[in-house]
Image (cartoon, rainbow, N blue to C red):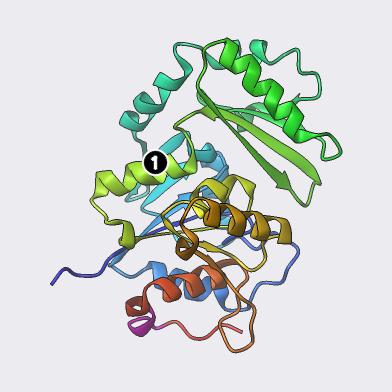
Amino acid sequence: MKEPKLLLCTDMDRTIIPNGFQPEPPEARREFNRFCGRPDVKLVYVTGRHVSLVKRAIKNYALPEPDFAITDVGTKIYQIGKGSWQQMADWEAEIDQDWHGKTHAQLKTILKPISELRLQESSKQNTHKLSYYLPLYLDKDSIIARIEAFLSEAGVEASILWSVDEPKNIGLLDVLPQNATKLHAINFLQNKLGYDLKEVIFAGDSGNDLPVLTSQIQSVLVANASDEIKKAAQQLSQHNGHPDALYLASNDPHQHNGNYSAGVLQGVFHYSPYFAETSNTEKLS
């Protein structure tokens, strides 16, 4: 019989990092760290953060070191071992094809006429990630439509991802190669490492997690996610034909607390009773 194994892919901010408005269960991160130390669990961080900010978060929030890190909203993948973080060149070669020879600087010039966009700091940019701020009071849908039109005319295949930085109350807009999404990066790792679909679980909380949350990958939406994201995730997963692949973590007193990493574990145990039965984690409340 095949030994059970798990590729646990999780967003960081407001998913396992408790930097949202809701409280974190006192033992959540300790139990999460213990679970991720299992030999049958490979941990993948899937985040919009740059690699230096990922490393800083691991240290500042006492998070487990991952086996892999998908950073910059899917544009970079790192393999981690013995403290060494190695970029996966085959992933970058794959996504580079979507921009059809256009550089980051050329895309920035193409989108310059859209005056509502404000370029994010250089630390939040990379070869395959062009990131902007967009005020929340603006009509994001019409602006995204204009971006798509400019890029299409330039022959660029791109994904436009929208999310909200709640503490700073600002919209975040990322222009990526079409295949440089969190979803494609997870699929790439799954295939490269030889995991079946039922051996992969993703956890997230925000708009840029929706492509994964509403896909056929077993996904967990932590309880501290906004009502807007919960509603959108349920509607899209139903529309995409994968309603059973989405689990909304709950703060029901009869279950584990569903905020942050406690919600991630609640979702893991929902999808895989084996890991619940063989885990030493205690009920979080």
Is there any visible trace of residue 14 in the rendered image? Answer: yes
Left or right? Give the position of 240 relative to 90.
right
Q: In this view, does 271 lie above or below 146?
A: below
Who's the residue at 60% across and 66% down the image?
Answer: 260
Who's the residue at 40% across and 67% down the image?
Answer: 36
Q: What residue type is labelled 1?
A: Tyr
Q: Residue 125: x, y in percent?
A: 59, 28
Who's the residue at 57% across and 49% down the image?
Answer: 210
Q: Is 277 one of the magenta-colored residues?
A: yes
Q: In which quarter of the image is the C terminus?
A: bottom right
Q: Label 1 belongs to which residue?
A: 78
Who's the residue at 37% across and 73% down the image?
Answer: 272
Instruction: Out of 124 and 213, give the one closest to the viewer.
Output: 213
Is there any visible trace of residue 58 in the rendered image? Answer: no
Residue with the most extreme right position: 137
Q: Residue 252: x, y in percent?
A: 64, 83
Left or right? Give the position of 273 relative to 254.
left
What is the total number of numbered labels drawn onto the structure image? 1
Magenta: main secondary structure: loop
Give the class, few, some or many, for how many residues have Cα within 10 Å of label 1's Cα (few <14, many ≥20).
Answer: many
Q: Is 104 one of the magenta-colored residues?
A: no
Q: Residue 103: x, y in percent?
A: 52, 13
Q: Residues in magenta?
A: 276-280
